[in-house]
């Protein structure tokens, strides 16, 4: 058989590539599967954070901000610990990005506060002189889409096996239960905000988009793996 392969270079090449590919898969796939598992203590996004993430995508924030800290000193000095694949286990879609008009945001929850985000979204140059980012004042007026956020979280639970409603994790439950939890989380954020219209809206039973976006931004980084 080997003599026949030596006399037929084409089939020899095919056989070589086949054996080489199998060996490569045996070597690579186990490590890849291990690396893609959720990092220790990683939690799914809460429903309010999910609503904020949907807004982040809707407003194309990922077009100017990446969420991927590469393992280089210049990156880690500026943005924090480099990204691990397991940190993205519950992200659908990934928001790695390929362009940085603004800074990387993968660890932004570790060093920015609710108050900072509120001022930045209302008037970027008030906290970052010379910023070219537009203001997002409409987020202080528009209501967050609670129903769509729940639908996404529920889909991730049922279809993709994201661990909602598990011990030590994020409780989702029914829509009414998730909505109640969403308002409790929103209250904690609004307490740290100054905008009176946002505070009044929450008192009326309405969560503004800016609250959801800030919840998402606060979740990015080491804090999401805490406890």
Image (tube, helix red, strand yellow):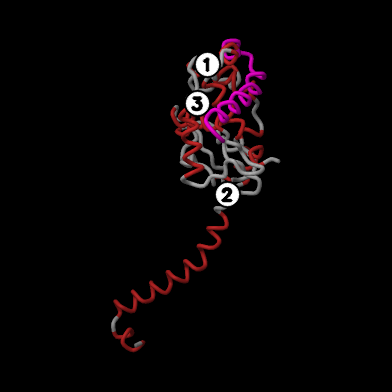
Q: Position of residue 197 (x, y in %)?
A: 57, 10
Q: CA distance from mark 2 to mark 1?
A: 33 Å
Q: Are marks 2 and 3 in contact (CB under 8 Å)?
A: no
Question: Do the numbered discs 2 and 1 sit on residues whose CB atoms are within 8 Å?
Answer: no
Q: Main secondary structure of the magenta part?
A: helix
Query: From the viewer's perspective, is residue 22 above or below residue 163?
Result: below
Figure quadrant of the C terminus: top right
Query: In the rendered image, which residue does mark 2 sit on?
Result: 86
The residue under the point 42% across, 74% down is: 19
Residue extent of the magenta highlight: 173-199
**Quadrant of the image for the N terminus?**
bottom left
Q: Residue 100 in the image: x percent, y percent?
A: 50, 35
Residue 38, given in percent of the width and then of the height, sits at 59, 49
Label 3 sits on a secondary structure element that is helix
Give the labeled residue for mark 1.
140
Residue 146 tag number: 3
Query: Residue 226's quadrant in the figure?
Result: top right
Q: Could you tell which of marks 2 and 1 lies nearer the N-terminus?
A: 2
At 61% across and 34% down in the image, what residue appears?
219
Q: Earlier in the sequence, mark 1 or mark 3?
A: 1
Rendered location of residue 30, percent (x, y): 54, 63
The local crowd at label 3, few if under 14, some if 14 to 19, many if 20 or more residues have their Cα within 10 Å, is many
Mark earlier in primary sequence (2, 3): 2
Structural distance between the alpha carbons of marks 1 and 3:
16 Å
């Amino acid at each position: 058989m080997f003599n026949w392969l030596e006399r037929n270079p084409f089939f020899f090449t095919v056989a070589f590539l086949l054996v080489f590919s199998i060996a490569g898969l045996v070597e690579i796939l186990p490590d890849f599967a291990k690396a893609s598992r959720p990092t220790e203590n990683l939690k799914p996004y809460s429903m309010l954070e999910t609503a904020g993430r949907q807004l982040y995508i809707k407003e194309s924030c990922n077009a100017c901000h990446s969420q991927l800290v590469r393992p280089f000193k210049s990156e880690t000095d500026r943005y924090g610990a480099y990204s691990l694949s397991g940190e993205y286990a519950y992200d659908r879609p990934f928001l790695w990005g390929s362009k940085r008009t603004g800074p990387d945001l993968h660890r932004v929850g570790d060093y920015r506060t609710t108050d900072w985000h509120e001022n930045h979204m209302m008037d970027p140059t008030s906290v970052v002189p010379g910023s070219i980012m537009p203001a997002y004042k409409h987020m202080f007026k528009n209501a967050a889409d609670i129903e769509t956020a729940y639908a996404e979280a529920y889909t991730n639970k049922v279809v993709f096996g994201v661990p909602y409603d598990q011990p030590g994790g994020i409780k989702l439950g029914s829509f009414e239960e998730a909505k109640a939890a969403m308002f409790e989380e929103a209250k904690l954020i609004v307490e740290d905000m100054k905008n009176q219209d946002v505070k009044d809206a929450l008192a009326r039973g309405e969560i503004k988009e800016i609250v959801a976006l800030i919840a998402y931004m606060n979740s990015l980084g080491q804090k999401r793996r805490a406890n």
